[in-house]
């Protein structure tokens, strides 16, 4: 069993949010870089993780679970990546969320399989374990699949429904933008949404950002708390950089 609990942070910001975004994409380049201006608020970020990708009737989820801090020393980080790959707690967490992705896809998709398992991926401030789970989907079932796989298991935990009930109980604020999805849907049925993590909500001259960590039986409180701060480090650096522009 796992639950992903999160913390929200905020600070006042009087400058240009686009400069924060520019700094963030430089500090933390990621597969999903986005800036959406909705008038009364803005959402922007550099997310490493897809909510779900649908292309040519193939649906894919890329579960990210298992995180170590990156130091910037390539040789040391290489050893840390090996430790991450062999860490029992991090592997247990990852396996649960890969299984959850398989189960979510299997409700509507066919021929579900794990194409890649526990790849090591390096980001600016963290090292992640990443897998790839895919299945075939009929054209008239795509919307059902999108709703059926939301929210991502890597933002809730497993089993998903119970984890979400506990999140509702223990987190004292609504997640709002955090853990949502943002991207596009094509007229041909293709779909590509990022999970809104490593991201900001800008509203009323205040920047909000949030991060979480997966809690399992063998979790250490201090380690999980530190994981949250590791994940927001790039965001804080981006704010400081933008304030100097």
Image: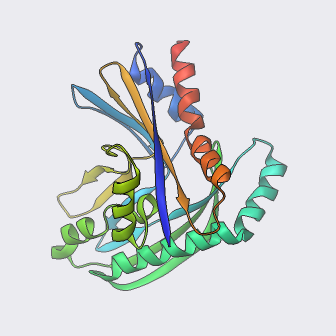
Residue found at x 22% / y 31%: 38
Q: Measured from the top left, where is residue 228 in percent x and y?
A: 57, 45
Q: Residue furthest right?
A: 75
- Residue 156: which quarter of the image? bottom left
Q: Quadrant of residue 209?
A: top left
Determine the image quadrant of residue 21. top left
Q: How is the image coloured?
A: rainbow
Going by the image, does 134 lie left or right of 69?
A: left
**Relative image position of residue 46 (x, y in whole percent):** 47, 41
> Can you say whether 125 is above or below 186 in the image?
above
Relative to 135, does residue 192 appear above or below in the rendering? above
Closest to the observer, 42 or 155: 155
In x, y percent, where is residue 172? 37, 45
Q: Is residue 80 above or below residue 93?
A: above
Residue under the point 71% across and 46% down: 70
Image point 34% across, 82% down: which residue?
A: 106
Return the residue nearer the eye: 189 or 126: 126
Q: Is residue 220 left or right of residue 31?
A: right
Give the mark count: 0
What residue is drawn where x is 36% and y is 56%? 169
Q: Where does the image place residue 60, in percent across and percent down from the top left?
A: 39, 70
């Amino acid at each position: 069993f796992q639950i992903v609990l999160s913390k929200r942070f905020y600070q006042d910001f009087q400058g240009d949010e686009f400069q924060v975004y520019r700094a963030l994409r430089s500090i933390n380049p990621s597969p999903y870089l986005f800036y959406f201006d909705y008038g009364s608020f803005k959402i922007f970020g550099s997310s490493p993780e897809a909510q779900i990708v649908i292309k040519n009737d193939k649906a894919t989820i890329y579960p990210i679970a298992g995180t170590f801090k990156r130091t910037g020393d390539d040789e040391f980080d290489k050893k840390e990546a090996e430790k991450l790959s062999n860490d029992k707690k991090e592997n247990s967490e990852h396996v649960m969320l890969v299984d959850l992705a398989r189960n979510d896809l299997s409700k509507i998709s066919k021929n579900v399989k794990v194409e890649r398992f526990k790849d090591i991926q390096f980001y600016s401030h963290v090292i992640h374990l990443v897998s790839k789970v895919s299945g075939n989907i009929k054209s008239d079932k795509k919307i059902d699949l999108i709703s059926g796989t939301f929210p991502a298991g890597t933002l809730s935990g497993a089993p998903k429904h119970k984890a979400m009930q506990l999140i509702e109980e223990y987190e004292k604020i609504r997640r709002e933008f955090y853990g949502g999805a943002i991207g596009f849907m094509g007229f041909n049925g293709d779909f590509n949404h990022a999970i809104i993590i490593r991201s900001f909500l800008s509203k009323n001259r205040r920047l909000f950002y949030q991060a979480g960590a997966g809690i399992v039986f063998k979790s250490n409180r201090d380690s999980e708390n530190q994981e949250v701060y590791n994940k927001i480090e790039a965001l804080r650096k981006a704010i400081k950089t933008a304030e100097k522009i």
